[in-house]
Image (tube, rainbow, N blue to C red):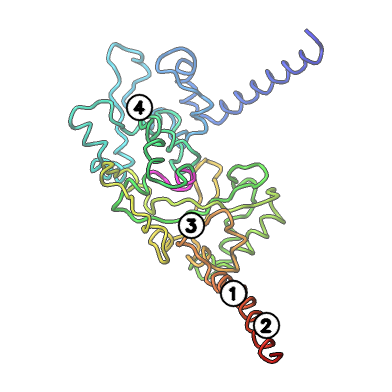
Amino acid sequence: MAPRLLLAVLLLAAAASAGAADASAALPDEAKACLACHGTESAPKVDASAFAKSVHNPLGCTGCHAGVDPAKHPGAAKPERVSCAGCHADSTKHYQASVHAAQREKGNEGAPACATCHTPHEVSAAAVGEGLKDACLGCHAAAVETHQKWLPNTARHLEVVSCAACHAPSVQRKVDLRLHDGIAKKRVSEELVPGFGDQVKKLDKDGKGLDPSQLRTLLAHVEQEGKVIQPVLIGRIEIRNGAESHQLAGKASAVKDCQRCHRAGAEPFQSVTLSVLGTDGKTLRYDAQKEVLSSPTSVESVRGFYAIGGTRIGLLDVLLALALLAGISAPLAHLALRKLLRKKQG
């Protein structure tokens, strides 16, 4: 093997080993004991690295599998199915009113339950990444094609509107402005923006949410003090109460009226948050005033989000109208002047 290739292989192996060691170090001791078997070949096999990054990692294995007695495990008896309702009562209540729960009650075991979308040992905050949308498309494979038949700019809508925002029609919506690194093209975690929360509180002294000027100041601070070279806010329409996102209705009840969003004063734009990723993978949200979506002061700050008709900036509309008026007036004035000169000459 060539020396350079051998060196590359050794470096990759060392990195993999270090990554595994870091993941192991992040696990509770009792989880390490369980993963001595379940992290290798014993079913169910659990990815230790993925579980270490899970929001359930602090709970350890016994947080959910409290009925398992290590002294008698493994035994002939199969462990009881874990219920998420003990901790997630509100989400469970809304799920029970959903089309998915109705299908399971009819005996459809293939209908989604908690672990179908959240995965058993890799549970992450639902609002993070594309995992939840991918979970929806995993079952509803024809959804993209179906939406393309009636929804303009389908790909963009599926990117910036959560599935539940339309498929849970009775809930209230909001815009979450997610802080992204414009160079790395990924969401920003709080490690890259030290003191982010403190800076928000310092600016938003009255607790009414960041106004357009304060938002611009905050992003300037991030660019100067943080490790993000090009901070960009990318908006996404989501459910205000995350638990309500489980109350999905049948497709016949889904929102198809464009005016729900694409009009002045639309309901989703009355509530705005700003978010970064926490060190535990959860989303940290901070309130912002709805004016940040339509103020000339913050137009540069929220350039990653614009909804036609819904987030119009009044001053820009006036300037556009004046520009159009000037464009029309100039040739009319020119024609009138020529006509007047001809009359004088004649």
Q: Which amino acid does label 3 sit on?
A: Ala
Q: Which of marks 3 and 4 is nearer the N terminus?
A: 4
Q: Residue furthest front?
A: 346
Q: Is residue 157 magenta-colored?
A: yes
Q: Distance between the residues labelled 4 and 2?
A: 89 Å
Residue sitting at 69 percent across and 87 percent down?
341
Residue carrying label 4: 65
Q: Which of marks 1 and 2 is in front?
A: 2
Q: Is residue 61 magenta-colored?
A: no
Q: Earlier in the sequence, mark 1 or mark 2?
A: 1
Residue sitting at 33 percent across and 45 percent down?
167
Element under label 1?
A: helix
Q: Which amino acid does label 1 sit on?
A: Ile
Q: Which amino acid does label 2 sit on?
A: Arg
Residue carrying label 2: 338
Q: Which of marks 1 and 3 is nearer the N terminus?
A: 3
Q: How far apart are marks 1 and 3 (CA)?
A: 28 Å
Residue sitting at 55 percent across and 51 percent down?
234
Q: Give the range drawn in magenta.
A: 156-163
Element under label 4?
A: loop
Residue carrying label 3: 307
Q: Distance between the residues labelled 1 and 4?
A: 73 Å
Q: Earlier in the sequence, mark 1 or mark 4?
A: 4
Marks 3 and 4 close (CB-CB < 8 Å): no
Residue 73 appears at what percent x and percent y?
35, 15
Q: How far apart are marks 3 and 2 (CA)?
A: 44 Å
Element under label 2?
A: helix
- Drawn side of residue 104 relative to residue 256, left or right: left
Label 4 environment density (alpha carbons within 10 Å; few <14, some 14–19, many ≥20)? some
Residue carrying label 1: 328
